[in-house]
Image (cartoon, rainbow, N blue to C red):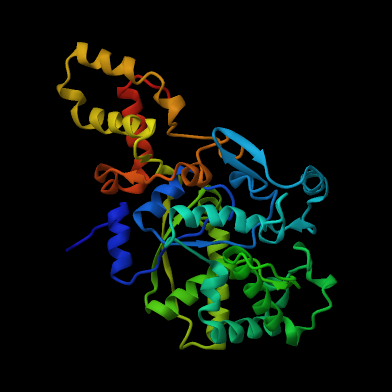
């Protein structure tokens, strides 16, 4: 089979089956519909697990979004502390924090995802730990040659991210400290067993995406990769200055080990937020999405009377199952809703063959045909 400009969900699944790195990199918190859609179809997820409570507004991690409401799951005192004291040198890492009932905050959200999609999730830490020896060697080299660019921060035992200058960790110990942080993060997201956290040195800058790219290169041998991304990553990753820094770091790492670092990596990026195309079996969303597909396929053959009948039936569709949300504001449908319902998220075959980048336009067109505002 020949695939030109692959971009649909089925295209990406075929690339994954052929051994290409295909991945989402979401943040622990509430997952909106597009993530549920992609996970249900089998797109792999590597959660970015060094995200912080307030910087991650789109995922609203200090709340549980369920039933159209945002329920605060951390204490009011902690919530206020995060809002009042978060700054560039004082951030609260989601994975380390606690809910009111004593569950780790990141684990609270991840557990609901696993209930719905048991095989969908990994994390950036888990990925790096899968090549533990190479990763340690690479970051030890970087600690000695690019310390200020790579290790500018550390996570204190209670999960507060601070400048690395306050850590007291010596250069020769930084890579080992970082590996311990990866182990902690992996445990905090995926295990219910409580541990006493120690924290340690944490990476930043371009090595966050580049380290994952390199691990997947080691495991697949492919320099082409396919990243389904949210709005923040789409904005910064496509900036020329970001790509220049990535390329410079890649070139620097070739001095460490040219056999393990390719001369180039090609990333194909897709706007995941467009993929709000799923429905829940037996839920009002099933009829909403069915109407959209029906109008896209048959509108030209319908007479005026039939169209008016459908318009009347569909008048509340956008309120019941919107094609667009304000993720940092709206209490959107999340994995917590799906987990409570105990039902399956379904994606019609119609949507699986449409390029992801074109899904938003198709949804808007369907709404226009239904006389709905998007």
Answer yes or no: is residue 208 visible: yes
Nearer the observer, 139 or 262: 139
Where does the image place residue 119, in percent across and percent down from the top left? Answer: 42, 62
**Left or right of 52, for residue 282:** left
How many numbered circles does the render carry?
A: 0
Which residue is found at the position 56% from the left and 83% from the top?
132
Nearer the observer, 281 or 299: 281
Which residue is found at the position 79% from the left and 83% from the top?
170
Tell me the quarter of the image containing the N terminus: bottom left
Nearer the observer, 317 or 259: 317
Which residue is found at the position 32% from the left and 53% from the top?
9
Is residue 15 shown above or below 171? above
Residue lying farthest left?
301
Where does the image place residue 289, in percent across and percent down from the top left? Answer: 33, 33
Where does the image place residue 317, in percent across and percent down from the top left? Answer: 39, 25
**Left or right of 250, for residue 295:** left
Which residue is found at the position 55% from the left and 32% from the top?
68
Residue lying farthest top?
305
Tell me the quarter of the image containing the C terminus: top left
Where does the image place residue 335, in percent across and percent down from the top left? Answer: 50, 47
Please identify the quarter of the rendering in which residue 165 is found: bottom right
Answer yes or no: is residue 374 visible: no
């Amino acid at each position: 089979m020949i695939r030109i400009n692959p971009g649909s969900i089925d295209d990406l699944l075929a690339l994954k089956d052929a051994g290409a790195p295909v991945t989402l990199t979401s943040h622990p918190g509430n997952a909106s519909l597009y993530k549920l859609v992609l996970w249900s179809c089998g797109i792999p997820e590597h959660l970015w697990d060094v995200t912080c409570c307030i910087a991650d507004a789109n995922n609203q991690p200090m709340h549980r979004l369920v039933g159209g409401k945002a329920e605060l799951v951390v204490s009011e005192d902690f919530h206020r502390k995060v809002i009042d004291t978060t700054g560039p040198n004082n951030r609260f890492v989601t994975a380390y924090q606690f809910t009111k009932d004593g569950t780790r905050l990141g684990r609270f959200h991840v557990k609901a995802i696993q209930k719905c999609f048991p095989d969908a999730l990994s994390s950036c830490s888990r990925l790096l730990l899968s090549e533990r020896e190479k990763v340690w060697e690479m970051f030890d080299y970087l600690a000695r040659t690019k310390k200020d660019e790579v290790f500018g921060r550390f996570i204190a035992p209670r999960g507060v991210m601070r400048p690395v200058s306050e850590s007291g960790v010596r250069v020769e110990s930084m890579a080992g400290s970082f590996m311990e942080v990866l182990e902690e993060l992996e445990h905090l997201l995926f295990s219910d067993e409580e541990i006493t956290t120690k924290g340690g040195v944490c990476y930043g800058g371009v090595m966050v995406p580049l380290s994952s790219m390199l691990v997947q290169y080691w495991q697949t041998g492919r320099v082409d990769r396919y990243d389904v991304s949210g709005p923040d990553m789409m904005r910064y990753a496509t900036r020329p200055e970001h790509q220049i820094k990535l390329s410079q770091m890649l070139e620097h790492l070739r001095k460490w080990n040219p056999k393990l670092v390719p001369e180039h990596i090609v990333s194909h990026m897709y706007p995941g937020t467009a993929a709000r195309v799923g429905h829940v079996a037996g839920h009002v969303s099933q009829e909403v999405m069915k109407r959209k597909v029906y109008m896209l396929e048959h509108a030209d053959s319908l007479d005026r009377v039939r169209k008016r009948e459908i318009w009347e039936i569909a008048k509340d569709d956008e309120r019941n199952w919107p094609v667009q949300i304000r993720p940092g504001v709206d209490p959107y449908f999340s994995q917590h809703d799906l987990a409570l319902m105990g039902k399956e998220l379904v994606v019609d075959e119609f949507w699986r063959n449409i390029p992801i980048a074109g899904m938003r336009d198709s949804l808007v067109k369907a709404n226009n045909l239904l006389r709905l505002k998007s």
